[in-house]
Structure formats: C-alpha cells, structure tokens
Amino acid sequence: MKFNLALMVALALAAFAAPGALSRPAAAEQATELRIATLAPSGSSWMKVFNAWNLTIQKETNNTLKLRFYAGGSQGDERDFVRKMRAGQMDGASITTTGLAQLVRQVLVLSVPGVFDEYEELDRVRAALNDRFAGMFDQEGYTLLGWGDVGKTRLFSMERIERPSDIKKLRPWAWKDDLIFTEFLKVVGANPVRLGVPEVYPALQTRMVDTLPASALAAVSLQWYTRLKFVSKQNSGIIVGATLIRRDKFEQLTEEQKQVLVETSIRAHKALNTSIRRDDAKSYQTVLKRGLTEVDTTENRAEWEAVGTQVRERLAGRVYPQSLLDAVIAAAGNEQ
C-alpha cells in the first residue's frame, strides 16, 4: 500500500479543519510541546493522521501548541510509555488496551473475546461508555483525548488453526502485559511466549514464536506476516486503542489551547478510525495475495465461543466487574 504523503496530509488537514475556521490569535508567548509516544511505525496510517493532526493544531493556535510524536516504539514498549508518563518523561501516549490497562485495568473489558467483532458494535459501546471510561482515567491523572482502532483481531500462524485446541502444539506469542490473550491460552492449555512488541519479529525469524494475534494492518506494518503462513478468516474482536495525556499537562494549557486540542482530537480520531478500518481491510487482502492461507473456522464456531465465554467469566470480578461486562454487552447489542 503506497500513499502520496503530501496528498494524505493535505486531505487530512482539510478533514480536520472546522468549516470557516480562521487562525486564532496567539494565547502564549512560547510554544508548548506535548510529547506523545506510540508503537505506530513512521509512515504508517496512524502516523500520517497524527502528523496531520499536529499541523492542524499548530495552525489553529498560531504555533503556540504542537504535538511531538515518538513513533515506532522509539520510547520502548507500551509499559515503558506508561512508566515514562508517570515519571514526566512523556506527556502522553497513543496505546492499545494493553497499555491503557496499566492505568485503568477495567478497560480490558473491551478486549475480551466474543463481546463484539464488528465496528458498529464497538462504536455503540464507546459512545455509551465513553464518559465512564474517561472518568476512570481522570481519577488516575490522565485526560482521554480520543479512541482509536488497530483493526480486527485475527490469528496468524505457521500451522493451520481450526479449533482452539490446535494452539496447544504451537508457540504462541503473548504480549508481556496482555492479560486477555494470556487467559485465553490458559483456557485452551497452551503455553505463551511472553515478549514485548519490538521482540516479536526477531522471535518469528528464529521460530521462537510461530503464532500470534494481530490485525492484518499491524501484521503488514510490522512485517510479521512475512514470517507466517496462515490467517484466520473470522476475527475474535477488534483491537482498541486510545490517546491520552497527563491531566496536569492538559491543565497547564490556556483555555484556547485546551479547546483546540480537544476539538482537533475529536476530528483526528474520527479520521484515524476511518483510515484504519479501510486500511485493515486492504491489508487483509494483501496478506492473502502475498500467499497466506485463509482458515475458515465456521465449523468449529461453538468451540471458539465456549472458550470465549470461559475467558470472560474467569476475568469477571478479577479484572473488571461483572456489571461493566454486562454494560458493554448491552451497549454492543449482543445480549448473551
């Protein structure tokens, strides 16, 4: 997937700009820079939108506020982002629920299998529970700027996986801080190889790992798919992410800067999700064209659903309250 970066930035800027928006008068003598870490690779769909967002903020604040993104895991893994935010070395991060859960553990309810697998369901959940989650992050000292997507969760592997028990004979990767997939592997009786994201590609090269959960877009962006042979046709969920900053950094901004940051963030994350959903679908077709074999697990759907149910039940009361799980299921429209 090749894009004309200049055209992408121009289109994104046009999308973010409010109708009739004019340059605002300067509200501060010195520019304020917010440092934000992300695993998104430079040149990826995420970074194209993030860079356009930054340009929009600078324009609308007369260069008194700007975002500086540290892409490609240059600041480490998501646990490192959280540690650096707490230490004041980073002002914010754009991270998945794995990183978000180190601040608010209950957010992992958005990652459990079998709750939603379509974007319309996810949109309903986030619309219904946004204020609830934003309040949780606020209590921990962080301001939620916007929700993002990473694509649909699929299983990529070197061996064909048709039913959950097939994973027991493989070497599945589990993110060091991913409680959900780790619990899934416990239920099916598999042993995870626990690594950080930057360690995955080398592990695939040496066959330390031969199975992993990822979106097609992530698998292409990180080149993981080049070391694997199979991909599941059905997705077990959607990888959810969000961008947040330290609340004290947000409160230090002028009222005008806060307004611009919030307004542009809403537009940026809306554009981001539109881009990611489109590009994830394209990436799935790309991995198939590049030789990965699609595995249809429809015949064994009952087994996958049974494992998903066990995972949700085992984590309820331990990672998130049952009432929150019920609220997510109700909002998604999937009463079970």
Image (cartoon, rainbow, N blue to C red):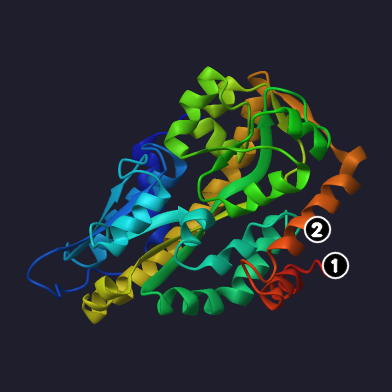
The image shows residue 233, relative to residue 225, as above or below, that is: below
Q: Position of residue 293 (x, y in %)?
A: 74, 23
The residue tagged 1 is 336
Q: Is residue 246 above or below residue 14?
A: below
**Residue 309 badge:** 2
Residue 20 in sight: no
Q: Is 207 on the left-hand or right-hand side of 234?
A: left
Q: Nearer the viewer, residue 141 or 222?
A: 141
Considering the numbered disc 1 on the image, is that residue within a helix, a strand or a loop?
A: loop
Q: Secondary structure at mark 2?
A: helix
x%, y% of residue 115? 74, 61
At a point 70% along the width and 44% down the height, the residue shown is 185
The residue most toward the left is 29
Which residue is drawn at the image coordinates 73% and 23% (left, top)?
A: 159
Q: Amino acid at mark 2?
A: Thr
In the displayed structure, would residue 35 be above or below residue 75?
below
Residue shown at 38%/40% (left/top)?
Answer: 7
Crowdedness near tag 2: few (<14), some (14–19) or many (≥20) residues, C-alpha within 10 Å: some
Q: Which quadrant holds the C terminus? A: bottom right
Q: Is residue 126 visible?
A: yes
Marks 1/2: CA–CA distance: 10 Å
Q: Which badge, 1 or 2, is on the more N-terminal residue?
A: 2
Where residue 56 appears, x then y in whole percent?
30, 59
What amino acid is found at the position of numbered circle 1 in the picture? Gln
Callout 1–callout 2 Cβ contact below 8 Å: yes
